[in-house]
Image: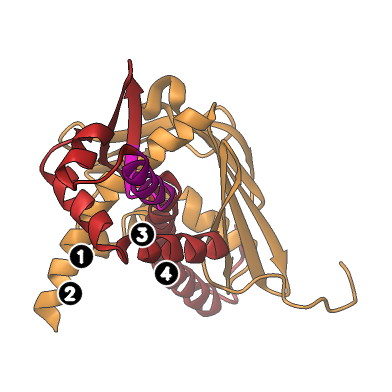
Amino acid sequence: MVQYTQTHFDASFAALSDVTRRGVLEQLARADASITDLAEKFDMTLTGMKKHVGVLEQAGLVTTEKIGRVRTCKLGVCRLEEEAAWIERYRQLWDARFNALDNVLEQLKRKEKADGRKKRK
Amino acid sequence: MDARRESEPTSPRTTVARKSERELVVTRTFNAPARLVFEAWSRPELFKQWWVPKSLGMTLRSCEMDVRTGGKYRLSFGDGMDFFGRYLEVVPNSRIVWTNEEGGENGSVTTVTLEEKGGKTLLVMSELYPSKEALDAAGTGAADAMHESFAQLDELLATLR
């Protein structure tokens, strides 16, 4: 997972290193667009734009969906990154619980020590 | 039982791994014997103290638990937010298995096992969902809810700085 995340960040940075691709992200933040729209807007060939969108898609920054003959692009979140994020939040929740449980256990241990001589139920 | 001293099996930190498409496994080591960990998990007045840590900014309105095989539990936060289910299996000081029925058909089954070694207890908690989709959905939902809680925590921490 960690390794994957590293690779994933590299892919994201590579994707963002290009001015056209940053422009495409800005454009998609305003509205979804087809590859044809984007190619026109950025004055590029369809093939060139497909390549840029492919890089953004690989990095998990953009998702595309083909409806009929038109491929629509929208801003997207990489699912694996999303999963890593919620698993980390889940871990933080249980970590907070277990840290609180440590305190409860310390209380119980102290109480047992104090009750040392008493018969245990 | 084993006379040989094995290297410490785990660090005390909480780890989470997605063991399969529909199972999450959490581990943690406690510096206390298993019977105390079991006690903290099975007596409501103790359970309440840690299951909803203060940092979450929430309080339990009620906590009913009948920790024995076939028993039921219900934790209420008010506002209709309830967690409830049944204990499928309870073996004192070593194992608790329960259903999480608030999730309906997509609810998970949680299994906690306690393994004591040299006065410390390794806790392994597995959450098994009926399907990959159910786990993914729970994750996204819980992440949203938790995100809110942690946002509150961030705010609180900011005021303390």
Which element carries disc 1, helix, strand or loop?
helix
Instruction: Report x, y in % for residue A70.
Output: 29, 23
Residue extending farthest to the top is A68
Instruction: Report x, y in % for residue A29.
Output: 15, 46
Which element carries disc 4, helix, strand or loop?
helix
- C-alpha separation, residue under disc 3 versus residue under disc 1: 33 Å
Mark 3 touching mark 4, by CB under 8 A?
no
Q: Which residue is mark 2?
A: B157
- C-alpha separation, residue under disc 1 versus residue under disc 4: 16 Å
Instruction: Report x, y in % for residue A82.
Output: 38, 49
Instruction: Report x, y in % for residue B149.
Output: 22, 55
x 20%, y 65%: residue: B153
| Residues marked 2 and 3, same chain | no
Residue A99 bears which disc, if any?
Answer: 4
- State which quarter of the image contains the N terminus of chain A: bottom right
> Relative to A43, is A114 on the left or the right?
right
Q: Which residue is mark 3?
A: A15
Say few, some or many: other residues with alpha carbon within 10 Å of mark 2 (under 14 / 14 to 19 / 20 or more). Answer: few
